[in-house]
Image (tube, rainbow, N blue to C red):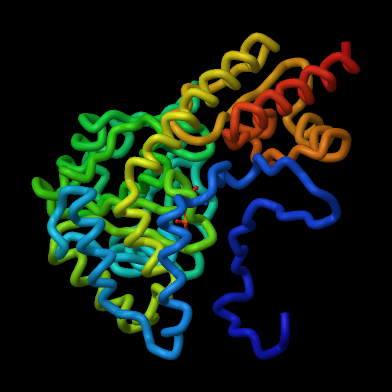
Amino acid sequence: MSRYFSKKFSNLIPYAPGEQPKDRRYLKLNTNESPFPPSEKTVKSVEDRLNRLQLYPDPESTEIIWAMAGMLKVKPGQLMITNGSDEVLNLAFMAYADENAPLVMPDITYGFYTSVADFNRIPYEEIPLGEDLTINPEDYMGIGKTIVIPNPNAPTGIALTIEEIEKIVSSNPDNIVIIDEAYVDFGAESCIQLINKYDNLIVSQTFSKSRSLAGARLGVAIANEEIIKDLNTLRFASNPYNINSLSGAIAVAAAEDNEYYMNNCKIIQENREYASQQLKNLGFRVTDSRTNFIFAESDRISGEELYLRLKEEKGILIRHFNKERIKNFNRITIGTREQMETLITGIKELLDTIG
Ligand code: PMP
């Protein structure tokens, strides 16, 4: 830290993204990326933008919003396009959480929430998951604070139903509820349509997972028009050209190629069921994931040892969290069937060495 760094950030612990080691080629199953490339149409969409890069992009993201509104069956005024859905979270926390409306979130969840809260100096409270790692909706009912919940939750993969989400939203009419649907396309129910019934709901979604576009950094906030106006006020105050022209073209093409991406989601769900079953056959406990990852633990090998040995001996990267309640677990991204077979073979071979 330099001696000029503002004291207000001296205790800030930044979010630690999954490792991207360059020392060798790994089978990367640690950052929940899609194993499938973007569609051909999506890739081609940037070509005619390249020779127009001297121009600023559209700060309103009008074309993307129209394409997305059709796809998500909402009004254009109910959407804001962002630089990854992390930007939705940051803007929504800034807009709706402070000492009068502190944040509440599950104790085991997406690690970015606490770092963005700290960054914005927002107090927060973490509500413990149940023994079975599920969120108990009752814990959030009438809580009178700003709520953020990923649905499905990460890294557990477990989802709430729309009815449970609705109870949380309807019982907190004076507070904003942010539902982070980063993984919703892999088998959970989206609560987007509730934005027409409740003015205190913000849904965030991303192009990074189900749309194979983590590198393009695209996310979307879905909420009633007044909320979207608030969020745009903060966005224009901080980063008005948040979507670069290339990502803008990509987003439109991806929205138009929805079938390709939704078909990939189905394949990933099949591969998830295959890998979960194989792990269960090897004695792992696997949560009921509705995402593009599995969360698993075994009595035969510790979470840390499995993570380290897969990395060093097999060249397979998975995600281990050094957090008390979940340190025996690992989060494993679902890849192609072949990648899952390589993973299972690797794990079997490691377990054989233990006996
Ligand atoms: N929410 C959750 C639960 C996530 O796991 C992630 C990905 N790390 C995000 C949001 C943010 O994704 P992105 O910024 O790539 O849209």
Furthest residue in direction left, as rendered: 197
Q: Is residue 122 visible?
A: no
- Residue at left 44%, top 41%? 106
Q: Is residue 282 left or right of residue 296?
A: right
Say if 78 sits above or below 56 in the image.
above
Residue 180: give x, y in percent of width and height. 36, 48
Tell me the quarter of the picture where residue 150 sits: top left
The answer to which of 165 and 143 lies nearer the viewer is: 165
- Residue at left 41%, top 61%? 218
The quarter of the picture where the C terminus appears is top right
Tell me the quarter of the picture where residue 56 sits: bottom left
The answer to which of 342 and 172 lies nearer the viewer is: 342
- Residue at left 90%, top 17%? 353
Q: Is residue 248 visible?
A: yes
Furthest residue in direction right, as rendered: 353
Say if 137 sits above or below 226 in the image.
above
Residue 179: give x, y in percent of width and height. 32, 47
Residue 23: give x, y in percent of width and height. 85, 55
Say if 62 sits above or below 262 in the image.
below
Tell me the quarter of the picture where residue 274 sits: top right
The answer to which of 273 and 306 lies nearer the viewer is: 273
Mark count: 0
Q: Is residue 18 left or right of residue 134?
A: right
Residue 169: give x, y in percent of width and height. 20, 43
The answer to which of 59 and 157 lies nearer the viewer is: 59
The quarter of the picture where the N terminus appears is bottom right
